[in-house]
Image: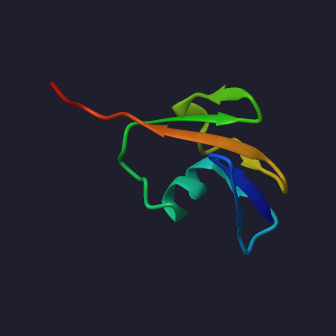
Amino acid sequence: MQLTINGKPRNFDAQQFSVAHLVQLLELTGKRLAIELNGEIVPRSQFEHMVLKDNDKLEIVGAVGGG
């Protein structure tokens, strides 16, 4: 499966999987994230249920603290 993540194509050895699984694959578990899938924000409560498909486009943004 090919996904475009933050404008860069990435290939994965699966036909489909959830947003939650992608977060694990990208080693982003536990981080504060905002994820947009094909132009729509995915609520964190839907990460497990939202299934990614070939050629989906994602934007993943992490929160940064500072002062």
Q: Is the residue 12 above or below the residue 26 in the image?
A: below
Q: Which residue is the extreme one toward the bottom? A: 13
Q: Nearer the viewer, residue 33 or 30?
A: 33
Could you say where residue 5 lies in the image, as x and y percent from the top left?
A: 65, 50
Could you say where residue 63 lies in the image, as x and y percent from the top left?
A: 37, 33
Q: Which residue is the extreme one toward the left? A: 67
For the image, the number of numbered tags is 0
Q: Is the residue 5 above or below the residue 44 in the image?
A: below
Q: Residue drawn 62% across and 40% down?
A: 59
Q: Residue drawn 63% across and 48% down?
A: 19
Drawn side of residue 67 relative to residue 38, left or right: left
Drawn side of residue 66 relative to residue 51, left or right: left
Q: Colour scheme of this structure image? A: rainbow
The quarter of the picture where residue 67 lies is top left
Could you say where residue 40 lies in the image, as x and y percent from the top left?
A: 71, 26
The quarter of the picture where residue 10 lies is bottom right
Q: Residue drawn 58% across and 57% down?
A: 21
Q: Is the residue 37 above or below the residue 30 in the image?
A: above
Could you say where residue 8 lies in the image, as x and y percent from the top left?
A: 67, 55
Quadrant holding the N terminus? bottom right
